[in-house]
Amino acid sequence: DIQMTQSPSTLSASVGDRVTITCRASESISIWLAWYQQKPGRAPKLLIYKASRLESGVPSRFSGSGSGTEFTLTITSLQPDDIGTYFCQQYHNYWTFGQGTKVEIK
Amino acid sequence: EVQLVQSGAELKKPGESLRISCKASGYSFTRDWIGWVRQMPGKGLEWMGFIFPLDFDTRYNPSFQGQVTISADKSINTAYLQWSSLKASDTAMYYCARLRDGLDVWGQGTTVIVS
């Protein structure tokens, strides 16, 4: 099984800050990685697929990078609407989610 | 508009059976994998399994194999998640989602409480 490890588990930042979340795979997954945002009480929302492709309608302040085993999600200027929990997911060999990163406003 | 609409919340007793549903609209149901994701209270996301409605090819997470059954009815564009004997540990939110590059469309979720 491919394991996905996210860090940090919680992140507190100010509005306007640049925020980075890291996701590491236990083996190479090429670019088969997606990122999701989940707000409390809501279904997750796809932000990024194929490691760096922005889903239609997602603000351009979100970006993804990486390949192989190390990936990052960056929010260039944190907005109040960005609070929530972010999950990475590999789909190279079936599907596995990271444990999530909770983003809060300081 | 592409949509997945799930059945309503369920309150069941241990040992009871249950089937929840996910109705797709706005796209060709038989052309994409569709599946189920569990989220236990306060926890992360776990993929349970996916089905390709065209030929009913089904893939299960080994952790859920034998515990649930995933099926689909092409005639009504609906996917199902079924339990034959619920346990208290099945209490969770269950989401259906369409699989393309990532899970791009999600249902609103179905809360299942077993108590």
Image (spheres, coloured by chain):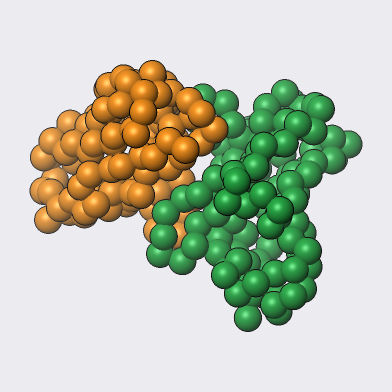
Chain colours: A orange, B green
In the image, taking residue B12 as reference, residue A3 lies left or right, namely left
In the image, taking residue A39 as reference, residue B106 lies left or right, namely right
Q: Is residue B94 above or below residue B113?
A: above
Quarter of the figure with residue A6: top left
Q: Residue at x 49, y 62 (%)?
A: B40
Can you give x and y, in whole percent of width and height, for residue A25 in the image? 34, 33
Q: Residue at x 60, y 74 (%)?
A: B88
Residue A36: in sight, yes or no? Answer: no
In the image, taking residue A18 as reference, residue A82 lies left or right, namely right
Q: Is residue B38 above or below residue A76?
A: below
Q: Is residue B86 above or below residue B82?
A: below
Q: Residue at x 79, y 33 (%)?
A: B56
Can you give x and y, in whole percent of width and height, for residue B13 in the image? 71, 79
Quarter of the figure with residue B24: top right
Can you give x and y, in whole percent of width and height, for residue B114 in the image? 64, 75
Instruction: Quarter of the image for the N terminus of chain B: give it.
Output: top right
In the image, taking residue B8 as reference, residue B91 lies left or right, namely left
Residue B18: in sight, yes or no? Answer: yes
Can you give x and y, in whole percent of width and height, for residue A83 in the image? 28, 50
- Front-most of A3 and B96? A3
Instruction: Quarter of the image for the C terminus of chain B: give it.
Output: bottom right
Q: Residue furthest right?
A: B75
Question: How many dots with numbers?
Answer: 0
Q: Is residue A34 above or below residue A41?
A: above
Q: Residue at x 56, y 37 (%)?
A: B105
